[in-house]
């Protein structure tokens, strides 16, 4: 009983000490809490100690070790003494000898004396009762409730430790306002978005605007023709002009009108040959020629079996000046108002896909504007020669002019077969378009 009281007293003292330390830390720390919006500290049990920290901190601080809150183990009881051995029993007496005379029957053998009963062993002294093992100490948990700091043994009910209102420090003073921030300004320089603070000398690059360029928009629908204007009223008859002067040849052989010498020699039928005039001055050099716009791109088509299908010629824009030509995949739009020269050239691999291995193939291009003419200009064909499994490399060239003076023209470039089942091994080339005045 003394040991139990001692352990209980030690446990209560340790808990009280821990609570006093916790209250001191919280009371001191709450002045900091006032600076961070009256934030309360967090508390936890990590298995070895009760810890605490403020919500804006990363590290936990040990408050009290759990070993200080657990009671010591009870002492073992003393072993009992061993009991004494019992005394041995006395030996039995010999039987009496028979009397001499007639031979009598032999006397009975004397009975052996009964051994004395063995003394019972003294009862073994009972071992001293081992001290009862102390109850396993439970982990202590701490939490912050809405109005109190609470604690409990793990699994038990929560008990109020201290009211938060009792350990809340006074509100801290309001901090001074920060310095006014600088105002940024922006500009576009050579297709780059730049910024700086107002008053700074150096502009800093923020973003390359060329990557924000979207696809060309579709051409607008042509507007309807306006209604014919009404006829104007008839004008008044003009007054008669003054009589004109009749040209005549002057004495110097020139044509005269009134009193004005035109400087033009009058050539008669049989007139004498006039003097050769002086050589005129050399004219000024003409200006360099220019065009309204031009376009350059790379073009290709994938490997495919044409048979009864067709494959597009994809165009990838590289240079575009003047904004008159736009492209997307195999669509190329020529803006209204100009005549355009279109030149497509490259290398074309083509072979036969005939089931009889004849080696015959045929391929041609269409432009979606004048397909029949385009087919005639671009057809590549092997016919009649029995060369199975043959792939040939051909130079491909297409050049013509398109008149878009009155409306936009949109070209759609395709490869197709014309007669046989044809295999396209691929096409790679360039396309150049020039807008003429």
Image (spheres, helix red, strand yellow):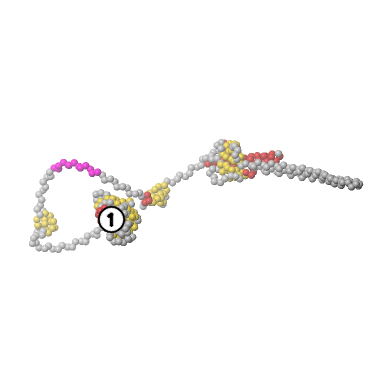
Q: Which residue is mark 1?
A: 419
Check if residue 133 falls in the magenta segment: no
Q: Which residues are magenta?
A: 224-236
Residue 24 visible = no
Q: Residue at x 45, y 44 (%)?
A: 180
Position above or below: 267 against 407: below
Q: Residue at x 9, y 49 (%)?
A: 243
Question: In the rendered view, does 114 fall on the left or right side of 44?
Answer: right
- Give the secondary structure at mark 1: loop
Q: Residue at x 62, y 44 (%)?
A: 65
Residue 46 visible = yes
37 vs 89, nearest the viewer: 89
The residue most toward the left is: 270
Q: Position of residue 307 (x, y in %)?
A: 31, 54
- Among the 4 quarters of the image, the one containing residue 301: bottom left
- Among the 4 quarters of the image, the one containing residue 3: top right
């Amino acid at each position: 009983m003394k040991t139990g009281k001692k352990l209980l007293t030690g446990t209560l003292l340790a808990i009280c000490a821990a609570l006093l330390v916790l209250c001191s830390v919280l009371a001191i720390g709450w002045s900091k809490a006032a600076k961070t919006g009256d934030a309360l500290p967090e508390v936890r049990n990590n298995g070895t100690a009760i810890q605490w920290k403020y919500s804006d901190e990363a590290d936990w601080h040990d408050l009290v070790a759990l070993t200080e809150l657990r009671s010591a183990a009870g002492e073992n009881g003393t072993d009992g003494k061993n009991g004494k051995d019992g005394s041995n029993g006395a030996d039995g007496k010999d039987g009496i000898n028979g009397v001499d005379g007639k031979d009598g029957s032999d006397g009975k053998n004397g009975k052996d004396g009964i051994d004395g009963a063995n003394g019972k062993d003294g009862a073994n002294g009972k071992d001293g009762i081992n001290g009862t093992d102390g109850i396993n100490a439970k982990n202590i948990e701490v939490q912050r409730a809405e109005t109190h700091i609470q604690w409990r043994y793990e699994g038990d009910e929560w008990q109020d430790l201290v009211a938060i209102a009792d350990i809340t420090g006074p509100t801290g003073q309001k901090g001074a306002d920060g310095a006014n921030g600088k105002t940024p300004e922006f500009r576009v320089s050579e297709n780059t978005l730049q910024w700086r603070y107002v008053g700074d000398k150096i502009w800093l690059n923020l973003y390359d605007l060329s990557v924000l360029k979207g696809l060309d928009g579709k051409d607008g629908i042509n507007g309807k023709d306006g209604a014919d204007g009404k006829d104007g009223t008839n004008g008044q008859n003009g007054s008669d002009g003054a009589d004109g002067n009749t040209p005549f040849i002057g004495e110097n052989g020139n044509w005269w009108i009134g009193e004005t010498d035109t400087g033009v020699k009058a050539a008669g039928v049989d007139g004498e040959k006039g003097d050769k005039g002086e050589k005129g001055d050399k004219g000024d050099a003409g200006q360099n020629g220019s065009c309204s716009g031009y376009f350059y791109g790379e073009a290709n088509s994938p490997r495919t079996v044409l048979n009864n299908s067709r494959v597009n010629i994809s165009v990838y824009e590289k240079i575009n000046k003047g904004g008159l030509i736009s492209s997307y995949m195999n669509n190329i739009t020529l803006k209204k108002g100009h005549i355009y020269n279109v030149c497509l050239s490259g290398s074309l691999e083509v072979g036969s896909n005939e089931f009889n291995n004849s080696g015959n193939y045929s391929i041609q291009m269409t432009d979606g504007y004048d397909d029949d003419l385009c087919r005639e200009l671009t057809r590549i064909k092997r016919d009649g020669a029995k060369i199975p499994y043959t792939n040939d490399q051909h130079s491909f060239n297409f050049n013509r002019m398109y008149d878009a003076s009155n409306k936009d023209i949109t070209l759609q470039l395709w490869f197709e077969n014309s007669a046989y089942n044809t295999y396209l091994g691929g096409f790679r080339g360039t396309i150049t378009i020039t807008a003429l005045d």
